[in-house]
Amino acid sequence: MVIAIDGPAGAGKSTVARAVAERLGFTYLDTGAMYRAVALAAAQRPGEEPARVAEQADITVGNRVTLDGRDVTDAIRGADVSAGASRVAADPGVRRALVAKQQAILREGDWVAEGRDIGSVVAPDAAVKVFLTASADERARRRAAELGLAPDQVLREQHARDRRDATADRTVLEPAPDAVPVDTTGLSLEDVVAQIEMLAVEAQELR
Ligand code: DC
């Protein structure tokens, strides 16, 4: 069974997805980490097509993220890689390669998968689809606290990233039509996790 958690940067996806996975005993899949790993690999191979880099890269995600056998868990969280990830994610060839890898990962087992296009593209048959949102200010505040940066700076970068994430022919910031919208502004982690857990229990009963 797949629980898809999509939404914009800073909506709380990672924290929520990890907590839901732990609660239900499912495995957590961070698809954003895969785009980040491709951005890092592409930066190290200038002149090579990012789509080719994405096809060839051996990426594993779990507690640690590895790229071609190297631990890049910390390296992929830098501001440069964030900007690079949003650029490579606009490349349809990169998306095709990573969506295929993600679908192979999700084929068996119970997963909480987090990203932008899980409910719409990667796992359209997901048993539960949640679209997490939060106000722009709240999203920037959370990310600033997480990264130890000034909220103003984060807000500016977030605007740029949201714009890029929403451009071209990408549907990544559009929720799947059957996704349940959950606005996390002002909600506790516990509230949000309980809501999603309830959706998962309902979905299991319907199976
Ligand atoms: O969630 P994140 O910040 O780690 O994602 C990094 C970038 O990858 C972000 O710009 C959005 C993009 N992304 C995507 O386009 N599709 C996904 N399924 C996950 C992330």
Image (spheres, grey):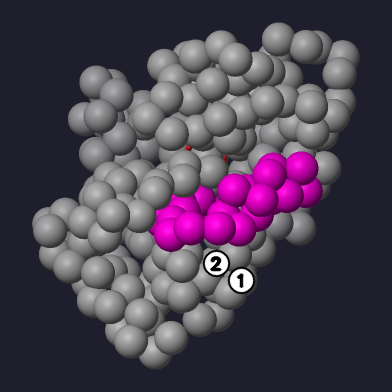
Q: Which residue is mark 2?
A: 119
Count the marks: how many?
2
Q: Which amino acid lies under the numbered mark 1 shown in the image of this protein?
A: Pro
- Residues packed near mark 2 inside 10 Å, few (<14), some (14 to 19) or many (20 plus): many
Q: Is residue 173 magenta?
A: no
Q: Which residue is mark 1?
A: 124
- Would you place residue 28 above or below residue 55 in this image? below
In the rendered image, residue 107 lying in the magenta stretch gets the answer yes
Q: Position of residue 64 (x, y in %)?
A: 42, 24
- Toward the viewer: 169 or 113? 113
**Residue 60 drawn at (x, y percent):** 56, 30
Secondary structure beneath dot 2 equals helix
Disc 2 residue type?
Answer: Gly
- Give the residue at x 30% y 35%: 143
* Residue 47, position as x, y percentages in the image: 87, 14
Residue at 77 percent of width and 48 percent of height: 96
The image's mark for residue 142 is none
Q: Position of residue 41 (x, y in %)?
A: 68, 18
Q: Residue furthest front?
A: 108
Q: Is residue 29 left or right of residue 118?
A: left
Which segment is the magenta one?
96-116
Who's the residue at 76% across and 42% down the image?
97
The picture quadrant where one finds residue 57 is top right
Q: Is residue 66 above or below residue 175?
A: above
- Whether residue 125 is situated above or below residue 72 in the rendered picture: below
| Element under disc 1 | loop
The image quadrant of residue 88 is top right
Residue beneath the point at 28% across and 69% down: 196
Does the CB distance between marks 2 and 1 fall below 8 Å? yes
Whether residue 106 can be seen here: yes
